[in-house]
Image (tube, rainbow, N blue to C red):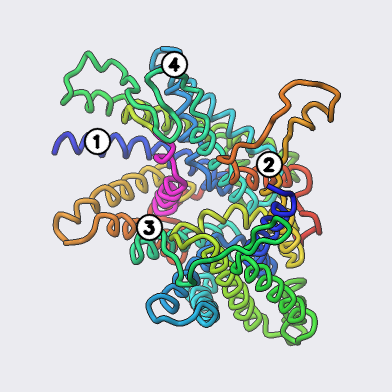
Amino acid sequence: MLEYLAYLSIMTGIYGILSLSLNLQYGFGGLANFGQVGFFCLGAYTSTLIVVLVKGPFILGLLGGIIAAGLFGWLISIPTANLKEDYWAIATLAAAEIVRLFFLNEDWIFGKGPYHGGAFGIGGIPRPLQSWFSATTYPFFYLCIVILCLIVTYFVIRLVTDSPFGRVLKAMREGDELPLAMGKNVGKYRMKVMALGGATGGLAGSLVAHFWSFIDPYAFMPIETFVVWAMVVVGGKGNNLGALVGAIIIQFFYSSTQFLKDYIPIDPQVLASLRMVLIGVLIVLVMLFMNEGLVKERKRIYR
Amino acid sequence: MPVAQIIINSIIRASELSLIALGLTLVYGLLKFSNFAHTEYAVIGVYLALIFNVYLGLDIFTSALLSAVITGFIAISFDRMIFRRLRKSSAIVLSVTSLGLAIAVRNMIRAIWGAEPRSYTIGLQEPLIFFGIRLTPVQIWIIVTAAVFMVAFHLLLHKTKLGKAMRASSDNPALAQASGIATEKVVVWVWFIASSFAAVGGILIALETYLLPYMGFAIIIPVFCATILGGIGNPYGAMLGALALGFAENFGLYLNFGNIFNLWGLFDVMKEIHIPTGYRDAISFGILIVILLIRPSGILGGRD
């Protein structure tokens, strides 16, 4: 039970980072990124490549994942930086699918060695300092790493959203006219947001790869993006604390409902689908009746 | 494979996509938001037709017709329950809401029918072979159906009062309303047309392949790509975009890019460059990104 709690906390922490990242893009910048999972996937694979193939240390893998996903975020914002919000959603959705298709098809990047890649996934991804701990205590150590990363992400993003940069983002969210009139290059701001959002998303990916120690392209289906969306929308867009609250609620709900099959005679496949139905319904209901989410954005007056 | 076969395959793909893309672009033109639940209307239609065709034993034409009409009413009721309450909201809010609806519908269908592929009872399809082209009767029906629906839509848009009202409302809703057009009534009609066309398009895809609960998600990017390629908000653009995308997808896999790489004989390295079949889906993603870079208003210049 305690081990399960550790597992749940680790996944909540990782999704908390994803949720903070999406909240920065959507909640503050008004950018509807429907391809958040692309950063997650790219971070996981880059980190794995560095640690498994180059035999680099965990920290290097983490940094590699952050940099690769950050670069990717910057890259995909180039075609869309000056377009209407509608195009963001579909362009990012497509970009995330390209990332997944790439790792699904290109199995040669992991060489001919013991690692398969492609549809078979990659197993045996080393966990940092595993030999120092027993199998039962290790998850708690990893939890500490995740919490540390979550805290750092939280304060970095808060620093950004509380800065003048963050104020421009919020102005941009309400329409390009005002920031443009103030002489702000909105396209450049969008690219920076996507780079930062990508980097934090990549961090979450690196963390998940070394925790699971197995990844395959099917772990990064678009549905993961939508779970993160539910977190941001339910928790409260434009509020960093809200993004974390949303991550905890959705992750708890998502994980706890899988035990329902022990109490109700229901096919696990059907149960899995119904859980996703609830995620979708939740998004619709919040958008309809509780537009600001659980934790409302702080209204601030700047002088 | 002969070139004629690739052309036919392209036209078949375009027929299926155009029916679905048309509805997406109509809704965008009128309500100014990207409806991410649009391809799910196609899947609703596909599984409704399964009920009529397999469970109730009706023939596929009646089943398709009935399910298209019911899908139309389902879309109208979704509008009543959800989208109408958000008419004054921003496009982003509407898109996110439609995404939530799409997830709910997609997984509801999977919860009911399971993830395994199903098919209609249309019997074994004996391909006809002429001039070296293989074409099944179903594929002929796909092309004919799409053509009939496109012509019908054109006539609707230009020869009826409703069509005039639709064009006026999507050009300038305020002016249309001021001139006595009941725009909300037009919205209801547009939802009906958009979703029933999507249902027919989905059924055509399911006839050629099979029924899957996730088929709506599988076509969402190609459908958006066709719409944006032709110019979002422009119905004729959607048709043109679907045609262009159908050809691009099929010829993209067929063509040998080695010729281009070597500038048609100027160089002599890497003579065989083909797009791997695993990247078939990536073709539409790639086109989407290129079109956003160079001409986001699309070929025909959509209403933006």
Q: Is residue B271 visible?
A: yes
Tell which subunit mark 3 falls on: B
At x 69%, y 45%, the residue is B287
Q: Is residue A16 left or right of residue B125?
A: left
Q: Say if labels 4 and 1 share a chain.
A: yes
Tell which subunit mark 1 falls on: A
- Tell me which label, 4 or 1, sits earlier in the chain: 1
Q: Which residue is mark 1?
A: A7
What type is the residue that disc 4 sits on?
Leu
C-alpha span from label 4 to label 2: 35 Å
* Front residue of B171 and A265: A265
Q: Position of residue A36 (x, y in %)?
A: 50, 42
Crowding near pointer 2: few (<14 within 10 Å), some, many (20+)?
A: many
What type is the residue that disc 3 sits on?
Glu
- Tell me which label, 1 or 2, sits earlier in the chain: 1
Depicted A156 relative to depicted B112: above or below: above
Q: Position of residue B29 (x, y in %)?
A: 70, 67
Q: Which image quadrant is residue A47 in?
A: top left
Q: Is residue A36 left or right of residue A74?
A: left
C-alpha span from label 3 to label 1: 31 Å
- What SS does tag 1 mark? helix
Q: Position of residue B185 (x, y in %)?
A: 63, 83
Q: Which residue is mark 4?
A: A53
What type is the residue that disc 2 sits on?
Ala
What type is the residue that disc 1 sits on?
Tyr
Q: Is residue A135 left or right of residue A71?
A: left
Q: Is residue A189 visible?
A: no
* Front residue of A52 and B85: A52
